[in-house]
Amino acid sequence: MTSSRLSGRVAYVLGGGSDGPARAGETLAIGNGRAIALRLSAEGATVIVGDKVLERAAATVEHLSGPGLAVQVDAADPASCRHAVAAAAAHAGRLDIVVCNVGISGREPLKVQTLEDWGLADDVNVRSHWITAQAALPGMLDAGSGAFVFVGSTAGILSSRRSLSYEATKAAQLAVMRHIAVRYAERGVRSNAVVLGNIDSALVRREFGADGSAARARVVPMGREGTPEEAASAVAFLASDDAGYITGQSLIVDGGVSAAWPIPPR
Ligand SMILES: NC(=O)c1ccc[n+]([C@@H]2O[C@H](COP(=O)([O-])OP(=O)(O)OC[C@H]3O[C@@H](n4cnc5c(N)ncnc54)[C@H](O)[C@@H]3O)[C@@H](O)[C@H]2O)c1
């Protein structure tokens, strides 16, 4: 169910395309970024979609419920991040909501962690987020309002043993989120994160295969993976006035994983 609670707002989604296979029986691949853009639009926002691959951003914009714009942006390039924010703000006159969704997963535990993997994970998962926020902030401060939502991962609060760079950058991302929240709370700017667990996204199907879905679901107390649409509904809540007194928080969307004491599956 959606509403018009974001009517008149302007949102920018960094990483709002989708990269990976669609769900069975569907043609449009749905990842978290695309689902977020579609949801913000369905709730009335004008949505500017940034992606490294312009066609992916354009495919999202094609499916929006209202106005939008696709912009090319490489999150690994600070100048490109700043340029995309400027283009987004120029398109609609301002930015009320900025969602930093882009994120890449490393695969290297400490023993084999490389500088290259570490550097790229930091550039994309953390640096692009604070640079994007920094570029969008002055307009929000002038307006006396604005909402940032960062798309985080349970890897930022729990170790999956898999990737040092992913876990460390996802933890740092939450620090960026909190810093913005506390530093600018008095000036009407809110900053929060969704911390996602196992989501049946195009990213997961691409990197881990659709076949592992049942196995991934077994570790979740709710017994299933979440959907990108469920991730998007949490983002839309945090971006909206319904979350007007919420800032500096991590909303965990993981079907109960982080609340559970690990026991062997029955
Ligand atoms: N799916 C899950 O289970 C899960 C769990 C926890 C957290 N997350 C988080 O969700 C976010 C991504 O989810 P998604 O489903 O949208 O992923 P995705 O891989 O589909 O990526 C979304 C878009 O980001 C774009 N992108 C990649 N690198 C980029 C770059 N350098 N610059 C600009 N755009 C770039 C891709 O082209 C793609 O269209 C990440 O922050 C990830 O850590 C996902």
Image (cartoon, rainbow, N blue to C red):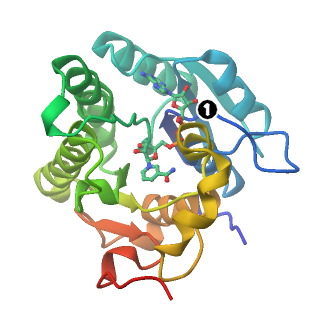
Seen from the viewer's position, the closer of residues 219 and 69 is 219
Q: Looking at this view, name the residue that lies furthest to the right.
A: 25
Is 129 situated left or right of 31 in this image?
Answer: left
Q: Which residue is mark 1?
A: 17
Task: State the residue at coordinates (85%, 47%).
Answer: 26
Looking at the image, is 189 positioned above or below residue 27?
A: below
User: Residue 97: x and y, percent?
Assistant: 44, 46
User: Foreground residue, 107 or 200?
Assistant: 107
Q: Is residue 131 left or right of residue 59?
A: left
Location of residue 159 in the rendering, given as x and y in whole percent from the top left corner: 23, 58
What SS does tag 1 mark?
A: loop
Residue at position x 34%, y 43% in the image: 143
Relative to 33, is 69 above or below?
above
Side (left or right) of 51 relative to 251: right
**Residue at the spot x=29%, y=56% of the render?**
160
Residue type for callout 1:
Gly
Number of numbered discs: 1
* Quadrant containing the N terminus in the rendered view: bottom right
Instruction: Please state the horizontal and vertical placement of residue 241, each as a whole percent of the image.
Output: 45, 67
The residue that appears at 24% across and 62% down in the rendered structure is 158
Return the residue found at the far bottom.
266
Q: Nearer the viewer, residue 143 or 231?
A: 231
Where is 31 relative to 222, above or below? above
Vertical comparison of 250 with 161: above or below:
below
Quarter-of-image position of residue 213: bottom right
How far from the left and from the top, in percent, is residue 7? 63, 55
Residue 218 visible in the snapshot = yes
Assess mark 1: CB under 8 A from ligand 1?
yes
Q: Is residue 7 visible?
A: no
Report crowding for label 1: few under 14, some 14 to 19, many 20 or more residues within 10 A (C-alpha).
many
